[in-house]
Image: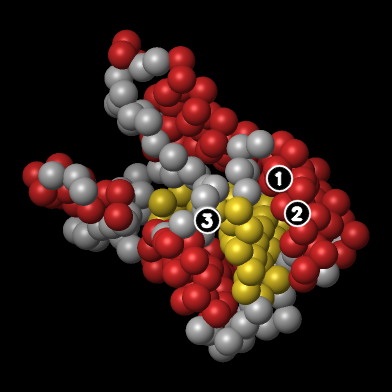
Amino acid sequence: MGLLKGKTALITGASRGIGKAIALLFAREGADIAITNITDDDEFRNAIKEIEACGVKVKGYVSNAAKFDDSQNVINEIVKDFTRIDILVNNAGITRDSLLMRMSEDQWDSVITVNLKSVFNITKAVVPVMLKQKSGSIINMSSVVGVSGNAGQSNYSASKAGIIGFTKSVAKEIGSRNIRCNAIAPGFIITEMTEKLPEDVKAEWINKIPLRRGGTPDDVANTALYLASELSSYVSGQTIHVCGGMLT
């Protein structure tokens, strides 16, 4: 359909899972793609090749979104290579699950830094580019546990709740410049990470979902496409739950 033809999209942490699905769908819809990853590994290089097969301009950048200077430098490189950034998807994230009474300071700090500070770092670096263009769409990957909380994930839940507050604030700050900022809150999504869970744990999660299935990365990517395109031109400051009705 070419919903993103002529646009350039940056997706962080796009070597696999949800980030990769978003990058591939955006490419199929005509966007040129910049993706980042913290390491230059086979998974990252293979993702670049898959996106290239969609027939758009693609470039991968090794960068640590959790580091402020790295984020500014990579945005400068991307603008040099692509001249503009129309869409930003802040997708990079990690988990370090543990009950609070057993959680180490490092488990807390690493999740907050990678999941939340990276969103600040990259968004702060991209906003001046979008202000100059007088347009842009920022999509931040939150989670249903950022709304509901989850035992054993106080660090992850806090980081994802922080993203929702950040999203609302940024939307209010830059909406007058024709820049939109929204969040997606995925529920139980079948990825490489969740696939490793024991079958009884997966079954327990699925039984809580009204649609009676886990989501797919493509389910999340389709929502990201809506938020990236002009189909959502009057949507900003919102958090869309992609959870099969789990939080209904």
Q: Amino acid at mark 2?
A: Ile
Q: x, y (%) of residue 174?
A: 81, 49
Q: x, y (%) of residue 96?
A: 37, 31
Callouts 1 and 3 close, C-beta under 8 Å: no
Q: Is residue 72 left or right of residue 196?
A: right
- Secondary element type, mark 2: helix
Callouts 2 and 1 close, C-beta under 8 Å: yes
Query: What residue do we see at 90% from left, 60% from top?
Result: 132
Give the label on residue 75, or none. Answer: 2
Query: What residue do we see at 65% from left, 79% from top?
Result: 57
Q: Amino acid at mark 1?
A: Ser
> Image height check: is 204 above or below 56?
above
- Residue at the disc numbered 1: 71
**Number of dots carrying numbers:** 3
- Residue at the disc numbered 3: 40
In front: label 3 or label 2? 3
Callouts 3 and 2 close, C-beta under 8 Å: no
Query: What residue do we see at 74% from left, 66% from top?
Result: 86
Query: What residue do we see at 31% from left, 14% from top?
Result: 102
Comes first in the chain, label 3 or label 2 = 3
Q: Amino acid at mark 3?
A: Asp
Q: x, y (%) of residue 181?
A: 68, 52
